Image (spheres, helix red, strand yellow):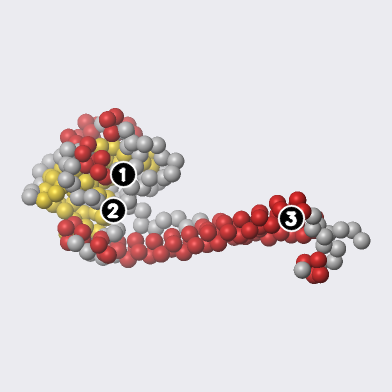
């Protein structure tokens, strides 16, 4: 059909077998990135709407599966600082360090794993931030999470060495001495700040980046370019 629309167009087999699948692949990538853009937009809308809600008790949030994801919650208990673990992480500003994960022990209820916030690498040792190891009963607020947050290139955790890269909650619970902890964790809010400033709470990312629309346009432009090069190269001189 193209040979009728484009004078001199006489496609050869090998270039056609290369170019046509290439164009199709690039278009598929473009539409995939477009779908990712809409997915990320929906996720950001959900996070913003849930974050705007008033905090509820964690047990009440867990009783409503449809509304529990990314809810702001509260929980009362005392931290067992002797069983904190450290997950390698970058802060919201991109600095390397660790999330401090600590069990919140509750009277007559399952413990809650709390991501108390981020510390610099040199503050991994709790003795260097002793002021922030709050004793006694307290009520914490934060965002309810349950995602493992494991990227496809992340290595395995090494619990025996307190080396963690992702949130393996069942294994974390055992390492913390609370194997019957709730199957979720709470990302602590920034306020009230911990004494001494560490760990630094408020590490919840409310709005995820959305580069996918730009990627979609890039793949689409490459598809157009490849198609144009193919058509031009397959025109025969008359």
The mark total stands at 3
Q: Is residue 9 visible?
A: yes
In screen coordinates, is 90 left or right of 213?
Answer: left
- Which is nearer the eye, 17 or 215? 17
Circle 2 Cα neighbour tier, 10 Å, few/some/many (<14 / 14–19 / ≥20): many
Dot 3 lies on which element?
helix
Return the x and y of residue 58 as percentages of the image width and height: 18, 57
Dot 1 lies on which element?
loop
Q: Does residue 19 sit above or below 3 in this rendering?
A: above
| Image-quadrant location for residue 159 | top left
| Image-quadrant location for residue 61 | bottom left
Mark number, residue 145: 2
Return the x and y of residue 64 as percentages of the image width and height: 22, 64
Closer to the chain start, of discs 3 and 2, is 3
- Which is nearer the eye, 20 or 42? 20
Residue pictured at 32% horizontal, 66% vertical: 49
Give the mark toward the camera: 3 or 1: 3
Give the mark toward the camera: 3 or 2: 3
Residue at the disc numbered 3: 16
Residue pictured at 29% horizontal, 29% vertical: 161
Circle 1 Cα neighbour tier, 10 Å, few/some/many (<14 / 14–19 / ≥20): some
Return the x and y of residue 187 as percentages of the image width and height: 27, 50
In screen coordinates, is 229 left or right of 100?
Answer: right
Residue at the disc numbered 1: 167
- In the rendered structure, are the residues bearing label 3 and label 1 in contact, judged by CB atoms less than 8 Å apart? no
Closer to the chain start, of discs 3 and 1, is 3
Residue pictured at 79% horizontal, 55% vertical: 12
In screen coordinates, is 172 left or right of 17?
Answer: left
- In the rendered structure, are the residues bearing label 2 and label 1 in contact, judged by CB atoms less than 8 Å apart? yes
Circle 3 Cα neighbour tier, 10 Å, few/some/many (<14 / 14–19 / ≥20): some
């Amino acid at each position: 059909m193209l040979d009728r629309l484009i004078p001199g167009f006489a496609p050869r087999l090998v270039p056609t077998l290369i170019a046509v699948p290439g164009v199709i692949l690039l278009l598929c990538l473009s539409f995939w990135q477009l779908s990712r853009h809409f997915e990320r937009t929906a996720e950001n809308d959900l996070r913003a709407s849930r974050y705007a809600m008033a905090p509820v008790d964690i047990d009440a949030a867990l009783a409503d599966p449809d509304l529990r994801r990314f809810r702001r919650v509260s929980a009362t208990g005392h931290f067992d600082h002797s069983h904190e673990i450290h997950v390698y992480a970058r802060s919201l500003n991109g600095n390397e360090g660790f999330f401090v994960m600590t069990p919140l022990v509750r009277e007559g209820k399952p413990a809650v794993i709390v991501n108390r916030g981020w510390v610099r690498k040199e503050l991994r040792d709790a003795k260097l931030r002793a002021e922030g190891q709050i004793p006694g009963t307290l009520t914490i607020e934060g965002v309810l999470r349950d995602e493992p947050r494991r990227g496809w290139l992340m290595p395995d955790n090494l619990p025996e060495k307190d080396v963690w890269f992702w949130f393996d909650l069942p294994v974390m619970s055992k390492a913390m001495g609370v194997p019957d902890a709730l199957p979720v964790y709470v990302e602590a809010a920034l306020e009230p700040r911990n004494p001494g400033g560490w760990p630094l709470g408020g590490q919840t990312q409310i709005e995820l980046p959305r580069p996918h629309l730009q990627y979609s346009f890039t793949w689409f432009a490459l598809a157009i370019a490849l198609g144009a090069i193919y058509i031009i190269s397959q025109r025969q001189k008359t």
